[in-house]
Image (cartoon, rainbow, N blue to C red):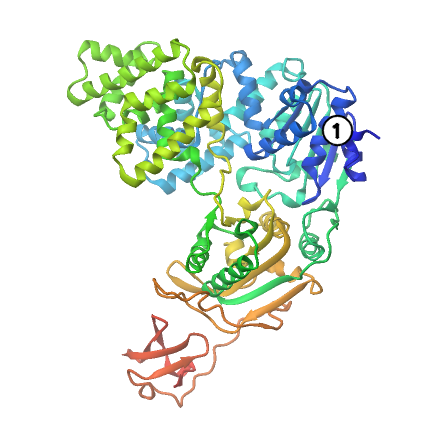
Amino acid sequence: MSDILSGLNSAQQEAASADGGQILILAGAGSGKTRTITHRVAWLLEQGKASPEQILVVTFTNKAAAELRERLSALLNEEQAAGVWAMTFHALCLRMLRQSGPAIGIANDFSVLGVADSRKLLSQVAEELGDSSAGRADEMRKIRSLISKAKNADQSPSALSGPLGIRAAAMWRAYDAECRNINALDFDDLLLKGRKLLAAEAGSGKWSSRFKYIMVDEYQDVNRVQEELLRGVSSAHQNLCVVGDDSQSVYAFRGAEVEHILRFRERWPQCRIFKLQQNYRSSAAILQAAQAVIDQASHASGKQLVATLPQGAPVMLLRFGSQWDEAAFIADRVRQLSKQGVELNDIAIAYRTNAQSQPLEEALQKNALAYTVIGGVSFMRRTEVQSLRSYLALLANPRDRLALDRVASWPRRGLGPAALKSIADQAQEGEGNLLIAMAELLESGSLKGKAASGAAELFSVFVKAFESQAQGQPLGAVIRLILQESGAYRMLRSAGEKGVEQLLNIDGLVEQAERFSGPAIDSLPDWLAETALTESSDGSAANGVKLMTLHAAKGLEFPYVFLSGLEEQLFLRGDVSRKELEEERRLLYVGMTRAERELVMSYSDLRRQWGREISTQPLQFLFDLPPQVVRKRAATKTGRPEPKGSDKRASGAGKIEDKEIYRRKPAVKKSAPAAADQSVNLNDFPAGCKVTHPKFGEGIVTGHKDGSLQVKFSGRLRTLKPEYARLRKL
């Protein structure tokens, strides 16, 4: 056996040493799939099966790609590690199009539109079309989603239907035309044009034969376009190895189709299948609980995870009176763990939707516990970073109107929409170069007043930047020159604490640029491409407890995990299809398998939403948890949030008692309302008397209105019929 494989278990060794053809590796959570992938690369190189440049490893996120490259660097020599193509789908298509784009009518120097610029361009298109969605954020978000989903499903604008779909189709066509006009591609376009390039080669071109061995990580998350990309790029050698876990497919809202991994054997009848089922992450109790949940999935590949760690503590399933009780208890438990020496970085709290973080954040703040919300505004989306990057984008591609629009007002210099439109119109009459058009308008005197002085100032910035490039200055030096000459440094220095924070962000961007060696004129295109691709990356988190949605938790692992708000109303909103229900089950499984040592799952009976309290039910998948490894407990009272400024910690957490908190029940018919107690009347409860209610606790009667009592409970006024309210005087 090769020394390369000596550190792997037997299943990993078999998968890593599988040679050519089609291979499906079903890798359960925590089973070492990344380790298997990287060791397979090393084994292929050791056996002389391919050169580094003939191996492609594709994944979905920049973080995952960086981890792959890091692990390959630890296994291979420097030259080999640098030669292997380990990257995201988008980065692969970007590289192919940079080299071969002209074959399908795309110039090599196209710009890559980041998320923010793509949104801005679509909004501009909506305004130019006079569409009512312009300026309406919610509606524009729906339209962007419609277009993106259609692109990733390999559909054309004509496939969109309905009033909103028809308008979205018109915007899509105009948006594509404008992208061609400014020589730009967005993220979805990168995939579509990459696929078009491969289709044009028809299996006999440069890219369809370039890679002898192709491996795909997280294959359960591919969409139709990505699947076709893989078939195209592997068409010559037919050596395709896919690695994934159908039980962790949770990105249908992004276009992912779990059917690709489930039907891989149908598409490739001769494929070999390997199962990685030894889990190295979670305790046996956590693993047994998670396995019981996923075993009920209707379409499963039959993996049975085997624990390699001891049994550990039982999984806790807690029921609370309200979301505030739940949050207070979690914060109190986090504080206890911290006192026991647990690092806050080792604790995660996950939930279904971002809106659920508020009570959790408040409870952590009351306990003086540091935390960070994963998935907040990432570095590359911050205004100052986007604005500075736009200067460089316009420097590299003077046809980029979006970049001009952004730099014109950062800092503000009197260049308004009318002046910018004049510059764009002038550019259209020539070759599209916006900077040349600006110079022509200045020379002819067409720009007046503040617009003229602002344009002259901006044009001067770019003249000096081009001169710096021509002198062979490195990218970092060119960026610092732009910051100085544009007045951005001066603006931020005078902006107080916010400006200091923005300057620190700017310094981070300059530092990143300085890692690109060579003259700016050579390194600028690569830097722009990399910053565009990382705009929507995971980002880095500060020290503290990690708060995140269950979707954001995928791919992460923590010793201590709390899953909060496990309620039907939060997971299954409205009518859901069987397919959607299955994905929510997989999402819960993903959350459970993030935990290494301790897993606490919880839900509450009441949750405040849209300004009112609603009764909730436990998530139906909780009924599948095995009682032998799960301890179920319930709080004894309903708490309420403390007033702002309160010093109380873990307020309303309540006493937790051992008792069964749910049991599987048959369908229950709605019961008739409780009979009225005719012996009770309004006058029994005069204004000012203290009462207690079985659900709302203690309160004070504030008055009578229309035959009802008005009672204030914990700061909230409620109107109750005395004959039904079951009130008791104190």
At which x and y percent is residue 543? 49, 46
Check the image and name the residue furthest to the bottom: 679
Residue closer to the observer: 550 or 137? 550
Q: Is residue 30 left or right of residue 145?
A: right
Q: Is residue 293 left or right of residue 137?
A: right
Residue at coordinates 73% horizontally, 22% vertically from top-left?
238
At which x and y percent is residue 532? 46, 27
Residue closer to the observer: 257 or 352? 352
Check the image and name the residue furthest to the left: 449
Please identify the quadrant where the C terminus is shown. bottom left
The residue indicated by pointer 1 is 22
At which x and y percent is residue 161? 46, 36
Residue 459's quadrant in the figure? top left
The local secondary structure at tag 1 comes to strand
Residue 562's quadrant in the figure? bottom right
Kindly identify the amino acid type of the residue bearing the numbered disc 1. Answer: Gln
Residue at coordinates 38% horizontally, 35% vertically from top-left?
382
At which x and y percent is residue 713? 37, 74
Residue at coordinates 55% horizontally, 25% vertically from top-left?
91
Residue closer to the observer: 150 or 420? 420
Please identify the quadrant where the N terminus is shown. top right
Q: Is residue 124 left or right of residue 11?
A: left
